Amino acid sequence: MLLNFWLVNESMVVRDIGRLRLPQVGRVTSHDGDVPFLVLDPHDQPVVAVLDYLRTCRACGFEPLSIEAYARGLLRWFRFLWAVEVSWDQATSVEARDFTLWLQQNKFHRRKPRPGRVGTVNAKTGKRRPGKGTAPTTINQTLSVVSEFYRYHLSAGAGPLLNPVPARRPGPGGERYAAHHNPLQAFPSSRRAPLRQKVPKRAPRSLPDAAFDELFASMKYDRDRALLAFYVSSASRPSELLGVTNKLVDPGNQTIGVIRKGTKALQHVPASPDAFVWLRLYQRDLPARCLRASAPMFWTLRRPLRPLEYDAARAVLLRAQKALGSDWSLHDLRHTALMRMSQDLNLVEVRDIAGHSSLRSTEAYLQPRQEEVLAHAREHFERLRDPQRRRDAQPHLPSPVLGYDADDMFELFGGAS
């Protein structure tokens, strides 16, 4: 019985979330049918309501990875409902609230826990390890999936009368929030949807030049050097680069063709000359079948040779960083490339290479790196201590890259006094 998890307060029942333990029942499994992933109940049978929803998502063109993410979010929700003995079609906002409280205090176990203490900060990268509770972004993603799940069933006349996880308040005319948003403009400000968590805004995490040089020097094979060189120069997403085939590699123009993650459109993006040199060195030892036009660009090192997938590429980075004590990710290399490009290219050009649909996403790469800000601050304090350097310091003028004439700038702001 679950009476230990309940506190009775006059006319209402309140769950003791602190003592609630979710059983590790049910699972997400891959499937060869029309739906790539299924959610199985404690009896190893597909959850029919989830299967119906995921089948519709697949029919709408959702990618398998998105289907898997939706399935795992719904598994969290159903495990909670199974623990409190509430049917999915009888869930209310009370269950959604308690589910959110449980997520804030608990975390779903990883198969392979990451080394290090919970909540500690990596001294080299500045990244904080996840705390004891579920991350706010994961909570918001899970709540959004559950909300869409119930919205789908409500439209079909099934499920509870009200969505237990309501979305944002509809706009004028009953439209959903930002239904006709212009990607070239900022989103209108509005209140967060119920139960959604505050997510701190973080600058893109990029590698300083010294950190990248150290990481690159730790690579033992030409394949891994080529992989890092393409990631840090093409700004491709990890899955996009691994999907490049030999026919999409153009050393003459120094470009590679990537299939964009969202639109599935083919786009040729530039890469550094060093990347193509390392690629050629790597391809010298590959068999002929790996050099065919339709063959992927990167392969595993162990035989039998197989196309390099995301998990294997991620493992390459993790193994190289064990001795370094860092925890950079493949996506950090993309951030690094875009941060470097933003110093020389204009914003529209960077957005095109990044494959962003909105300039707002690209604007994040205009922020200075934290180490650069700290270095400039140290120089500032040194000038304050040295009167001679303070007199010799030039006044800060707007950057000439903005297109202003130098004489006009001098006329407006003057020179050194």
Image (tube, grey):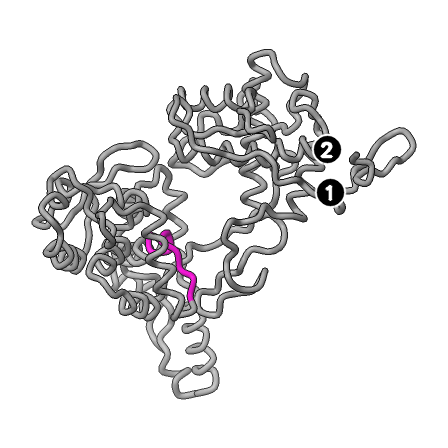
Q: Please say whether residue 214 is one of the residues in the magenta stretch.
A: no
Displayed quadrant of residue 265: top left
Asked if the residue at tag 2 contacts the one at tag 1, i.e. Cβ–Cβ closer than 8 Å, the answer is yes
Q: Please say whether residue 327 is one of the residues in the magenta stretch.
A: yes
Where is the N terminus found, in terms of image quarters? top right
Q: Amino acid at mark 1?
A: Leu
Which residue is more in the foreground, 203 or 138?
138
Q: Which residue is mark 2?
A: 84
**How many C-alpha atoms fall within 10 Å of the one at disc 1: few (<14), some, or many (≥20)?**
some
Q: Looking at the picture, how far across and down is residue 149, in whole percent?
A: 55, 25
Q: Is residue 39 above or below residue 239?
A: above
Residue 20, disc: 1
Magenta highlight range: 326-334
Residue drawn 37% across the image and 79% down it: 393
Spot the residue most to the top: 157
Q: Earlier in the sequence, mark 1 or mark 2?
A: 1
User: Which type of secondary structure does the marked residue at label 1 adopt?
Assistant: loop
Residue drawn 66% across the image and 20% down it: 89
Q: Amino acid at mark 2?
A: Val
Residue drawn 52% across the image and 55% down it: 113
Residue drawn 63% across the image and 54% down it: 132
Q: Is any part of residue 274 visible from this angle?
A: yes
Q: Looking at the picture, how far across and down is residue 28, in whole percent?
A: 50, 34
Q: Looking at the picture, how far across and down is residue 60, in whole percent?
A: 40, 21
Q: Is residue 330 above or below residue 188?
A: below
Displayed quadrant of residue 280: bottom left
Q: Is residue 166 above or below residue 238?
A: above
Which residue is more in the foreground, 386 or 29?
29
Q: CA distance from mark 1 to mark 2?
A: 9 Å
Q: Looking at the picture, how far across and down is residue 233, in whole percent?
A: 24, 55
**How many C-alpha atoms fall within 10 Å of the one at disc 2: few (<14), some, or many (≥20)?**
some
